[in-house]
Image (tube, rainbow, N blue to C red):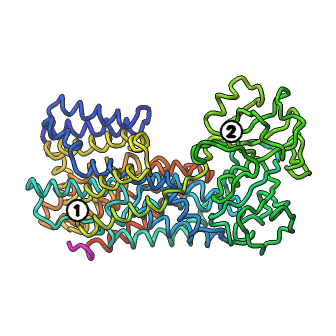
């Protein structure tokens, strides 16, 4: 092995150790590695920086606003709400969550998708009493698996496809057919279905009965009154279908229509402007507030959209002019506040009288929906004291959900039919999200995870050093000798190496570093690189063993109440089962 290869190996080991140490930002570790490689002339500067002009990397950046548009308009929230409903058992919940989410992750980035689904799954567990620890880990795993179905599912797929096309264009690889949107499907879909079945039949049995469902809002009990919004999906559904008759987390104590009280029977069909009164612990109140179609019954006119509002817990000041007035008298004349009263509590308990008749006293607690102006108007705490923002809760905007969904569908169709490139389709979709009001300019810019783009670009550049120094060929020769010159054994070695790396460093870095080795193996064995590209994509998304292996694993750790060993207990057998499916099918479906 040459001195350059030894130096590159030492540099990669150092980078690996710093990534595992986790004391510095990932982007800083990668940029430092690129800088050292450039200083030591392990590859030309242009080659080390080629990642930032790579079409795959730019496509990744262009897809972030598309995902943000789907997120901010509530398109996914509406779909998930209609598909999931209120399942009666864990298995039903898993089927209703895992199947649509895994399919959605084939076309949407898994991180924003999981971010959108966590509140929905948490709401299901609150309303049904199902154990969240049986659902959240599977949510992360099936999105990772679903991302292997198409090129759009995860950034590493686009990067591997881009690197492959570049290698063919430069002559580093023998010509193969261009990797298209649905090429990964032939192993990605079977692997995903296998993973879904595993999580339902085996994975949930391996998981503990442990879930953190409390929000940390407080221990008060509130009386809260909502009305049914006209045109919402709640209109026409029964109280039972809407999930309002479950006594586990809240109690429906009153139901009225046109000013007349009606016994809240489970089969009553809801109509617009019906009023529902609940007695609920503080930690269940935000879940009711975020239910699409429920609006607080007592409100002032607000000159801002509800998706811009926040939920705040306040205590009524002794100086407040509202003292002595009934809730039904609000808002008072000349009140400077724009707010919606969600719930009231006295001495930590829910009042017994109807909210309309409840007379306010100093020290009464309330949960109110406010806009940003509230914090300025109440800056001296003249009327409300102990204001506390309830972080993490937002009313989902849905006014442009259909538009965002149509834009995404058109993008997929354009790319799938090759009417334009994936990059062009993504750029057009991002621009259309902006022009149709699904995103603002500021939101579009902030939606791009620039640190991730820096890491991906640097990882692509490092591939030049690994290849140019001869290190990739040396590792490939070792793999080939261990496998006895068998293409199937070489394919298995590439897959296993990628799986190991993706569980300890980023999936893009794992895929890119193993890409160079895979190219050398395919060239040395004289076989098509196509199946190697496919198993690279699959292996880079098999981050099931380590919670830090992928950000979605970390995102579900807190709501699921998981510890490190929970991931290994489920992830190791899942990795083995999925790997078996991939390695059996790849040579058959893609030829080797």
* Residue in the picture at 25% in, 36% down: 10
Q: Quadrant of residue 103?
A: bottom left
Within the magenta stretch, is there residue 88?
no
Who is closer to the viewer here, 167 or 480?
167
Q: What is the magenta range?
A: 588-592
Q: Quadrant of the C terminus?
A: bottom left
Q: Which numbered disc covers residue 282?
A: none
Q: Residue at x 48, y 53 (%)?
A: 71
Dominant secondary structure of the residues highlighted in magenta in the image: helix
Q: Residues within 10 Å of mark 1 (few under 14, many from 20)?
A: some
x and y percentages locating residue 243 in the rendered image: 71, 66
Provide the secondary structure element on which disc 1 rests.
loop
User: Is residue 363 found left or right of 186 in the rendered image?
Assistant: right
Residue, disc 1: 420
Does residue 443 appear left or right of residue 369 in this picture? left
> In this picture, is 321 found above or below 591?
above
Residue at far top of view: 380
Which residue sits at x=64%, y=28%?
376
Q: Secondary structure at mark 2?
A: loop
Q: Residues within 10 Å of mark 2 (few under 14, many from 20)?
A: some
What x and y, as percent, mark residue 446?
A: 42, 40
| Image position, residue 358 (x, y; %) | 89, 46
**Cβ–Cβ below 8 Å for labels 2 and 1?**
no
**Mark seen at residue 338:** 2
Q: Nearer the viewer, mark 2 or mark 1?
A: 2
- For residue 276, above or below residue 214: below
Q: Which residue is nearer to you in this view: 96 or 297?
A: 297
In three-dimensional space, the C-alpha distance between marks 2 and 1, rounded to whole angstroms, equals 48 Å
Q: Position of residue 137 (x, y in %)?
A: 55, 58
Dot placed on the residue nearer the N-terminal end, 2 or 1: 2
């Amino acid at each position: 092995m040459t001195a350059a290869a030894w130096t590159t190996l030492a540099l990669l080991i150092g980078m690996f150790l710093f990534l595992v140490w986790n004391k510095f930002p990932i982007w800083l570790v990668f940029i430092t590695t690129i800088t050292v490689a450039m200083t030591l002339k392990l590859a030309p500067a242009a080659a080390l920086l080629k990642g930032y002009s790579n079409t795959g990397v730019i496509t990744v950046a262009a897809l972030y606003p598309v995902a943000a548009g789907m997120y901010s308009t509530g398109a996914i929230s509406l779909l998930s709400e209609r598909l999931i409903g209120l399942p009666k058992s864990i298995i039903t919940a898993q089927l209703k969550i895992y199947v649509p989410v895994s399919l959605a992750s084939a076309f949407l980035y898994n991180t924003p998708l999981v971010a959108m689904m966590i509140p929905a799954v948490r709401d299901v567990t609150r309303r049904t009493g199902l154990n969240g620890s049986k659902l959240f880990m599977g949510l992360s795993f099936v999105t990772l698996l679903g991302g292997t179905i198409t090129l759009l599912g995860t950034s590493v797929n686009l990067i591997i496809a881009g690197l492959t096309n570049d290698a063919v264009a430069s002559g580093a690889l023998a010509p193969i057919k261009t990797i298209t949107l649905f090429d990964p499907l032939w192993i990605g879909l079977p692997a995903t279905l296998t993973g879904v079945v595993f999580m339902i039949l085996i994975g949930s049995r391996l998981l503990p009965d442990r879930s953190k469902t409390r929000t940390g809002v407080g221990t008060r009990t509130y009386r809260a009154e909502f009305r049914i919004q006209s045109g919402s999906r709640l209109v026409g559904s029964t109280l039972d279908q809407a999930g309002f008759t479950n006594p586990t987390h809240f109690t429906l104590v009153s139901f009225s229509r046109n000013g007349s009280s009606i016994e809240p029977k489970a089969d009553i069909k809801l109509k617009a402007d019906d009023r529902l009164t609940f007695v609920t612990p503080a930690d269940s109140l935000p879940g009711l507030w975020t239910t699409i179609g429920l609006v607080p019954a007592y409100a002032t006119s607000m000159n801002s959209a509800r998706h811009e509002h926040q939920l705040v817990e306040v205590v009524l000041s002794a100086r407040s002019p509202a003292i002595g007035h009934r809730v039904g008298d609000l808002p008072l004349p000349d009140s400077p506040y724009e707010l919606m009263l969600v719930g009231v509590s006295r001495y930590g308990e829910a009042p017994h009288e109807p909210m309309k008749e409840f007379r306010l006293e100093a020290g009464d607690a309330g949960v109110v929906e406010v806009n940003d102006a509230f914090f300025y108007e109440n800056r001296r705490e003249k009327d409300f004291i102990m204001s506390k923002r309830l972080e993490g809760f937002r009313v989902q905007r849905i006014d442009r959900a259909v538009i965002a969904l149509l834009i995404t569908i058109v993008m997929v169709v354009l790319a799938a039919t090759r009417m334009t490139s994936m990059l062009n389709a993504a750029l057009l979709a991002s621009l259309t999200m902006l022009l149709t009001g699904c995103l603002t300019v500021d939101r579009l810019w902030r939606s791009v995870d620039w640190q991730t783009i820096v890491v991906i670009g640097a990882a692509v550049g490092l591939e030049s050093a690994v290849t140019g120094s001869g290190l990739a060929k040396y590792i490939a020769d070792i793999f080939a000798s261990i496998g006895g010159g068998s293409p199937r054994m070489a394919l298995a070695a590439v897959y296993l190496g990628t799986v190991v790396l993706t569980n300890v460093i980023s999936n893009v870095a794992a895929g890119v570093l193993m890409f160079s080795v895979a190219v050398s193996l395919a060239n040395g064995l004289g076989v098509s690189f196509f199946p190697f590209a496919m198993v690279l994509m699959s292996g880079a998304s098999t981050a099931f063993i380590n919670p830090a292996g992928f950000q979605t694993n970390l995102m579900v750790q807190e709501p699921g109440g998981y510890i490190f060993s929970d991931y290994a207990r489920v992830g190791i057998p899942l990795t083995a089962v999925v790997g078996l499916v991939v390695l059996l099918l790849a040579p058959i479906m893609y030829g080797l």
